[in-house]
Image: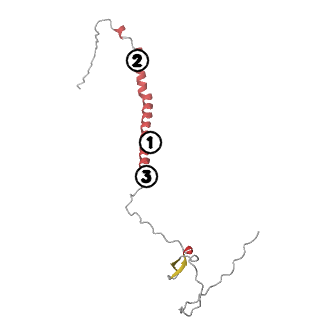
Amino acid sequence: MSHPERPAAVEVHHPIPITSVDPYTAPLVPVQSGVERQPVVWVPDAYGRMVPMPKHLAPAPVTATEPRDLSPLPLLDPVAQRLIGGGIGGGVLSAGLGYGTGQVISATAGFTSGAGLWILLLLLLLLRAPAPSAISDGGSTVNIRKAVIKRSHFYG
């Protein structure tokens, strides 16, 4: 396993201040052609001073943020309102169905034990009773009722 080479020590550069130069007495320096020049931009440094920097090394410009929409929003999101309404409505529906089913089952149980017994007794009485054709002989029916009332008084 090979280790990467250590980076070389950083060389500190101390700039030499620029002095004014007399163009007539200055030595001749070769001029860079326009092909070799790169565009230069001025950017602020850490102390707020504007310094030149090649354009390809300059940081990307900061884009302006879009303005926010400050219109008031509803207290609850419309989707949340629909979900809450569906939950409450579904709960009420389930409670109503459960209550109604309980009432039907209770009535069925009560009918089979109470009213069903009475209906069965009435059916048995009707089946055991003589047929109406056997009773009637074509004449009229007369009911005779004899009542005996006895009262005793004691005046003593």
Closer to the camera: disc 1 or disc 3? 3
Spatial CA distance of label 3 from label 2 is 66 Å
Spatial CA distance of label 1 from label 3 is 22 Å
Q: Would residue 45 be seen by someone viewing this image from the given angle?
A: no
Q: Secondary structure at mark 2?
A: helix
Disc 1 target residue: 94
Occupied quadrant, residue 89: top left
Instruction: From this view, report whether residue 77 is shown above or below residue 66.
Output: above
What is the x, y in percent for residue 62?
49, 71
In the rendered view, does 100 fall on the left or right side of 51? Answer: left
Taking the spot 41% from the left edge, 27% from the top edge, the residue there is 115
Disc 3 target residue: 79
Q: Secondary structure at mark 3?
A: helix
What is the x, y in percent for residue 49?
50, 83
- Which is more toward the observer, 129 or 57? 57
In the rendered view, does 32 fall on the left or right side of 154? Answer: right
Q: Can you name the residue that lies furthest to the left here?
A: 155
Along the polypeptide, which appears first: circle 1 or circle 3?
3
Per the rendering, the mark at residue 125 is 2
- Which is more toward the observer, 14 or 155? 14
What is the x, y in percent for residue 52?
53, 80
Occupied quadrant, residue 136: top left
- Which is more toward the observer, 145 or 41? 41
What is the x, y in percent for residue 14?
61, 87
Taking the spot 35% from the left edge, 11% from the top edge, the residue there is 132
Which amino acid does the dot numbered 3 rest on?
Val
Spatial CA distance of label 2 from label 1 is 44 Å
